[in-house]
Image: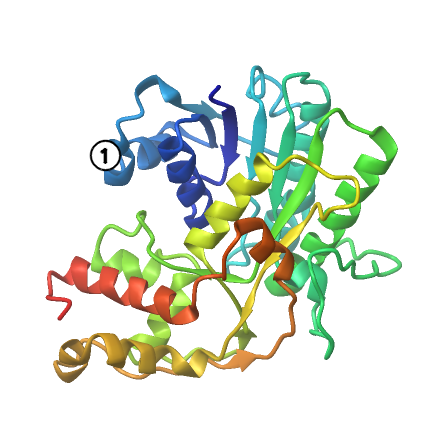
Amino acid sequence: MAATILITGSTGLIGFRILLAALAAGHNVRYTVRSEDKAKVVSSNPAVQRLAPGERLSPVIIPDFTVEGAFDSALQGVTHIIHAGSPVPLPNYEPTTEIFQPTIKISSGLLSSALKTPSVKRLIITSSIVANLGAVPPPTAVSAKTRVPLPDPVPATFDNVFDAYVLGKIVELHNSDEFVKTHSPHFTVSHVVPGYVFGHNELALDATMMQTQNSSNNFLMVGMVGGELPFPIHGGFAHIDDVADAHLRVAFLDPQSDGPKDFGIATKVDYGTIFDHVAKAFPKAVAEGVFKRGTVPTLPVEYDSSDVEKLLGEKLRTFESAVVDVAAQYLETLGKEKA
């Protein structure tokens, strides 16, 4: 029997890829957006059109996800929730009101609404490895079950978007743990915890979008078109296909009392290899100057993803495959041969 899945964040790299995977698997998908225009971004996308979902795909317009009860009506009849719509640390965002507070309020609101909805069986929250690592990665390996101690007191305001993002993810993990402990809900709550997510992005429809509206893939583009990133990024990577697969696997996983409930996806990587992978796959485009070596510094991290490999039943996809996927898509948008 097909499930009815509510997906947040469907206009982002992760949420949209999950939406496509859920539709391809035959499920009914309800996706939340803030406006009709955002709904059309999803429904009119060529990748969605190719799947011809018909009535299996429907939008729910919620102008403000942070208000109390925002998801109450959207969850009616929903069996599974995948919350991939948490804010990302864009430099133009206000750290406190546009990153930290929504990260906590939206997850809390979904949990509260789910508690009032008997049909809900599972709630999956997309987190980030920074929730397990903290602001400064420790020298020893962490995993999805690692919990970073909360600061005392938790800051009320932030000046930096990245600090707001990291602490928001840490607080959200603690709050969700406490919710389950306090309410013993009729549904299971799990987190999928990826590193930087890279791979083919169906939402990037032209060459300009590939460099400016390509989510975390923007970092890969810097490394393959001669740019220079002025700060290091965490050296833990997740292929978008693995991330989407993991969300759906966790959503339909029979929970075990002694088994993991949270699953991290982060393969250790050196971003200095980006251009090397591109040059190996597309020497002609390199010779023509389409691709140039850029600089993306790496912040080393140690992360244990063995649980998710057991879940998926196979090794995680390689960093090289993600780089090649993104480079190939860029060539497509330019109308150039991939030889």
Q: Is residue 34 at least partly visible in the picture? A: yes
Q: Is residue 84 at least partly visible in the picture? A: no
- CA neighbours of label 1 inside 10 A, class few (<14), some (14 to 19), many (20+): few
Please provide percent x and percent y for residue 100.
Answer: 66, 51
Question: In the image, what residue occupies the spot 65% across and 74% down?
Answer: 302
Residue receiving disc 1: 50
Please provide percent x and percent y for residue 77.
Answer: 56, 15
Please provide percent x and percent y for residue 328.
Answer: 23, 64
40 left or right of 153 in image:
left
User: 77 and 157: which one is in front?
Assistant: 77
Establish if 75 lies above or below 198. Answer: above
328 left or right of 161 in image:
left
User: 165 and 178: which one is in front?
Assistant: 178
Residue 183, by quadrant, is top right
Type of the residue with mark 1: Arg
Residue 154, by quadrant, is bottom right
User: 14 and 165: which one is in front?
Assistant: 14
Question: In the image, what residue occupies the spot 59% across and 48% down?
Answer: 98
Establish if 185 lies above or below 108. Answer: above
User: 95 and 58: which one is in front?
Assistant: 58
Residue 117, by quadrant, is top right
Establish if 323 lies above or below 90. Answer: below
Q: Secondary structure at mark 1?
A: helix
Furthest-front residue in this view: 313
Q: Locate the C terminus by quadrant.
A: bottom left
Question: In the image, what residue occupies the spot 53% across and 50% down?
Answer: 312
